[in-house]
Image (cartoon, rainbow, N blue to C red):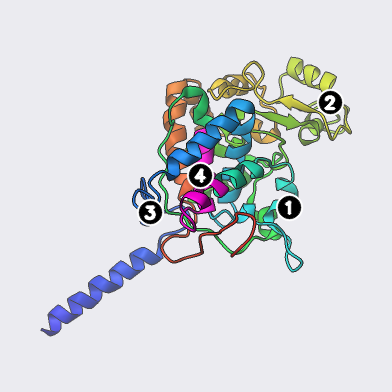
């Protein structure tokens, strides 16, 4: 009897240690396909209908919503903390410099309003962001490009300071990028596949590196690469000279308003052309160019030139990202309005 009791204690302790070891990037047991199948059967169809309609009107919407998803997940996990407005007591993530150029919030509000009418207090804002990102990117293809597990709940805290710390910058070096992604249990392949989503103040950049295949970037985020890069009036030697010359015709050293297509020749398409350009040293941002400075990352870039390979990797990586730091079960809440806690 005593030995059986000790064995039971050992099993319980081992289980507790296993659960406690799960970090921000661990798959959540609380997420599953069709989570709202019983509580709100039409939830995903409602999201898709609205997003498809809005994406048809605005071809840059996929860039906006995918970037929103990345920026949300990289701060406190995928809990829709990014959507919260600042209050008199606290400045929210939304107002942090890396997030000032984010857009698409009104579309999320539109979806939330429709879901509250259909199933009050049921579908989280966090799940809406994840589904909207998927559906907007999928719209041109007429089918869902990846599966989205649902069951996330909404966070109650949103802090500008945490956005500044957790969102990688367009000027980040490779070591910084690897560390940032590792903190979310994401590896080098995820970095190459997803990191385009990350860069702050990217205007309507499709912030996921393959997503970097669609969207635009502000001149002020890469002007340093064009003018006086080493203090000798030169451009970044890792940037194709002809491409640098072209960019100088679009951007002055102090231009804070002009935007340029991030993926020349394929700016509004979700494809793998970004990697073709990158191999030709036409990555717009410094954080693009550094992917070629590491052997492992460079091999991933080579593989991603093939759209089939890229799409398979993208599905895997964005699913992993969608698991980061999620709240499930009785954690957090289901907001009535995505911009405010209940």
Marks 2 and 4 close (CB-CB < 8 Å): no
Residue 146 x/y as whole percent: 42, 34
Marks 3 and 1 close (CB-CB < 8 Å): no
Residue 3 showing in the rendered view: yes
Marks 3 and 4 close (CB-CB < 8 Å): no
Q: Which residue of the protein is positioned furthest toward the left in this rendering?
A: 1
Residue 4 x/y as whole percent: 13, 78
Say if the magenta span includes residue 124: yes
Q: Nearer the viewer, mark 1 or mark 4?
A: 4
Say if the magenta span includes residue 58: no
Q: Out of 272 and 340, give the one closest to the viewer.
A: 340
- Quadrant for the C terminus in the image: bottom right
Identify whether 174 is placed above or below 341. above
Left or right, 188 with respect to 98, comes to left
Q: Residue at x 29, y 69 (%)?
A: 14
Q: Nearer the viewer, mark 2 or mark 1?
A: 1
Left or right, 32 with respect to 300, comes to left
Res. 163 image quadrant:
bottom right
Identify whether 226 is placed above or below 1. above
Return the residue at label 4. 130
């Amino acid at each position: 009897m005593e030995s059986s009791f000790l064995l039971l204690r050992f099993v319980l302790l081992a289980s507790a240690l296993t659960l406690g070891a799960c970090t921000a990037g661990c798959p959540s047991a609380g997420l599953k396909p069709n989570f709202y199948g019983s509580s709100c059967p039409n939830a995903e169809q409602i999201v898709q209908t609205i997003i498809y309609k809005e994406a048809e009107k605005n071809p840059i919407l996929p860039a906006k919503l995918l970037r929103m998803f990345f920026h949300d997940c990289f701060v406190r996990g995928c809990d829709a903390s990014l959507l919260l407005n600042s209050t008199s007591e606290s400045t929210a993530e939304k107002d942090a410099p890396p997030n000032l150029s984010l857009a698409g919030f009104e579309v999320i509000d539109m979806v939330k309003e429709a879901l509250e009418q259909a199933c009050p207090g049921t579908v989280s804002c966090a799940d809406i962001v994840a589904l909207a990102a998927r559906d907007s990117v999928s719209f041109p293809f007429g089918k869902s490009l990846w599966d989205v597990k649902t069951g996330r709940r909404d966070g109650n805290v949103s802090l500008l300071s945490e956005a500044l710390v957790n969102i990688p910058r367009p000027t980040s070096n490779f070591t910084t990028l690897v560390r940032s992604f590792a903190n979310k249990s994401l590896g080098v392949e995820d970095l190459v596949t997803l990191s385009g989503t990350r860069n702050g103040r990217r205007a309507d950049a499709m912030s996921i590196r393959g997503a970097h295949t669609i969207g635009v970037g502000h001149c002020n985020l890469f002007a340093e690469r064009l003018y006086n890069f080493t203090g000798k009036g030169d451009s970044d030697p890792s940037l194709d000279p002809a491409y640098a010359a072209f960019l100088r015709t679009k951007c002055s050293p102090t231009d804070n308003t002009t935007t340029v297509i991030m993926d020349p020749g394929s700016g509004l398409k979700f494809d793998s052309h970004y990697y073709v350009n990158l191999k030709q040293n036409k990555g717009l941002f410094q954080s693009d160019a550094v992917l070629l400075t590491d052997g492992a990352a460079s091999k991933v870039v080579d593989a991603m030139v093939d759209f089939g390979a890229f799409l398979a990797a993208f599905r895997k990586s964005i699913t992993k990202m969608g698991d980061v730091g999620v709240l499930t079960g009785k954690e957090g809440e289901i907001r009535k309005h995505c911009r405010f806690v209940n």
